[in-house]
Amino acid sequence: MSKRLQVLLEEAEFDQIRAIARRHRMTVAEWVRQSLRHARAQEPAADSETKRAALERSVEHCFPTGDIDQVLAEVESGYAGRTT
């Protein structure tokens, strides 16, 4: 479901945004949507305390590991056998 968002801008700022949108051959609304998506993507998914707690939990585990070149070769060999 779509929601409407109203943003009030000074006329000069709106004119600048409209000019940018035109250069990209899109409507102001589409340019704003894309700009908001980009800004949202730049935001961290979680706060630093949540990330720190996840890191602390992860180091409690002991998983097998190997030489990175060997691991990558094994991964690639697995892809080589796939048909799709």
Image (tube, grey):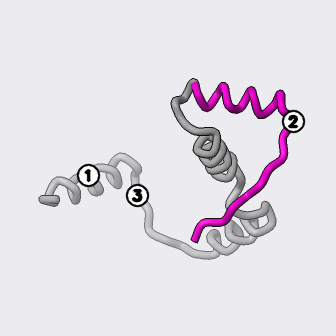
Identify the residue shown where x is 71% and y is 52%.
Answer: 43
Q: In the rendered picture of this protein, how many numbered marks are placed on residues?
A: 3
Q: What is the CA distance from the residue labelled 1 to the residue labelled 3?
A: 15 Å
Residue 59 spot, x, y in % from top left = 64, 69
Residue 14 spot, x, y in % from top left = 77, 34
Identify the residue shown where x is 62% and y is 48%.
Answer: 33
Quadrant location of residue 35? top right
**For this view, does 52 lie left or right of residue 22?**
right
Q: Amino acid at mark 3?
A: Gly
Disc 2 crowd rating (10 Å Cα; few below 14, some 14-19, many 20+) is few
- The magenta stretch spans residue 3: yes
Disc 3 crowd rating (10 Å Cα; few below 14, some 14-19, many 20+) is few
Quadrant location of residue 66? bottom left
Q: Nearer the viewer, residue 67 or 23?
A: 23
Q: Secondary structure at mark 2?
A: loop
Vertical relation: 12 (above or below) 78: above
Vertical relation: 55 (above or below) 25: below
Disc 1 crowd rating (10 Å Cα; few below 14, some 14-19, many 20+) is few
The quadrant of the image that shows the N terminus is bottom right
**For this view, does 37 lie left or right of residue 66?**
right
Quadrant location of residue 30? top right
Task: Look at the image and give the residue range highlighted in magenta.
Answer: 1-22
Q: Nearer the viewer, residue 38 or 33?
A: 33
Closer to the N terminus: mark 2 or mark 3? 2
Q: Which residue is mark 1?
A: 76
Q: Secondary structure at mark 1?
A: helix
- The magenta stretch spans residue 6: yes
Closer to the N terminus: mark 1 or mark 3? 3
The quadrant of the image that shows the C terminus is bottom left
Q: Which residue is mark 2?
A: 10
Q: Which residue is mark 3?
A: 66
Closer to the N terminus: mark 1 or mark 2? 2
